[in-house]
Amino acid sequence: MRLDVVTIFPEYLEPLNVSLVGKARARGQLGVHVHDLRQWTYDRHNTVDDTPYGGGPGMVMKTDPWGDCLDQVLADGYDSGAHGPVMVVPTPSGRPFTQELAVELAAQPWLIFTPARYEGIDRRVMDEYATRIPVHEVSIGDYVLAGGEAAVLVITEAVARLLPGVLGNAESHRDDSFAPGEMANLLEGPVYTKPPVWRGRAIPDVLLSGHHGKIARWRRDEALRRTAANRPDLLERTEASAFDKKDRET
Ligand SMILES: Nc1cc(-c2ccc3ccn(Cc4ccccc4)c3c2)n[nH]1
């Protein structure tokens, strides 16, 4: 997979050099190319913004720097086979970023992120590229950031961990809260490791029992408990499981 990121704060993307994404890059599983939008400005002040038509607070990011930069990113190209690139535009007014969308994006060979600042990018830029490639406007949550770079870090990590061979233990994302299966749509329950007692706090006996059926049942019960407490809305989507059916029989 190739990622291109266009930003006025390239240093904001340095976390993509460390940890899971950094390792995937070092192994050649992921290519990340960060572009400083100001390299596509030609005035003395490297201007990327201007006042909004119609008035109102703040500034809007200008068309030309984005157009010149994105044309070059597309022209530099990448052999992504039948699929061309997909543009991902972080915005408070976008489609909610979910595990489902992460899976969808992880299947793409080439993503181009366009994190903006100020009040956003002149709408004509997205309209222009939507005639050539898929453009997804994506929100990472119902809160307001000052720009899109943090969203790029979030989306990139959620997508990279789904790439084959990137997560050490291939099983790791099998039990994701939002992945299909027994724990689908349930929040993760508590996890424990050595020592068996810490400051007088022991771990649940069932986890030392070696009884995998009981352990699996306990983990689902804990996940249900936490989901009911923190995300009751998810319980609407939770399929009755084998455990629940067994409950009803007993
Ligand atoms: N989920 C999510 C995404 C963002 C986001 C993404 C990109 C940008 C670019 C500029 N801003 C600031 C802004 C504040 C309010 C209205 C419009 C723009 C951004 C915010 N906030 N929250």
Image (cartoon, helix red, strand yellow):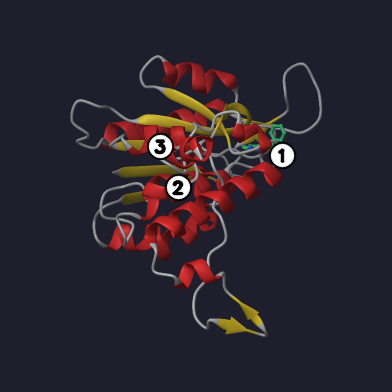
Q: Residue at point 48% right, 52% down?
A: 217
| Residue type pointed to by label 2 | Asp
- Secondary structure at badge 3 equals loop
Which callout, 1 or 2, points at the residue further toward the start of the chain?
1
Q: Name the quadrant containing residue 216.
A: bottom left
> In the image, is residue 144 above or below residue 133?
below
Q: Which residue is mark 2?
A: 176
Q: Position of residue 184 (x, y in %)?
A: 47, 39
Q: Nearer the viewer, mark 1 or mark 2?
A: 2
Q: Nearer the viewer, mark 3 or mark 1?
A: 3
Q: Position of residue 231 (x, y in %)?
A: 66, 40
> In the image, is residue 26 above or below residue 43?
below
- Secondary structure at badge 2 equals loop
Assign ligand 1 to one image quadrant: top right
Q: Residue at point 62% right, 83% down?
A: 198
Q: Position of residue 191 (x, y in %)?
A: 53, 65
- Secondary structure at badge 1 equals loop
Is 38 left or right of 78, judged from the image as shown?
right
Q: Residue at point 40% right, 39% down?
A: 181
Q: Which residue is mark 3?
A: 180
Q: Quadrant of the N terminus?
A: top left
Is 153 left or right of 82, judged from the image as shown?
right
| Residue type pointed to by label 3 | Pro
Label 1 within 8 A of ligand 1 by Cβ: yes
Which callout, 3 or 1, points at the residue further toward the start of the chain?
1
Is 119 left or right of 44, judged from the image as shown?
right
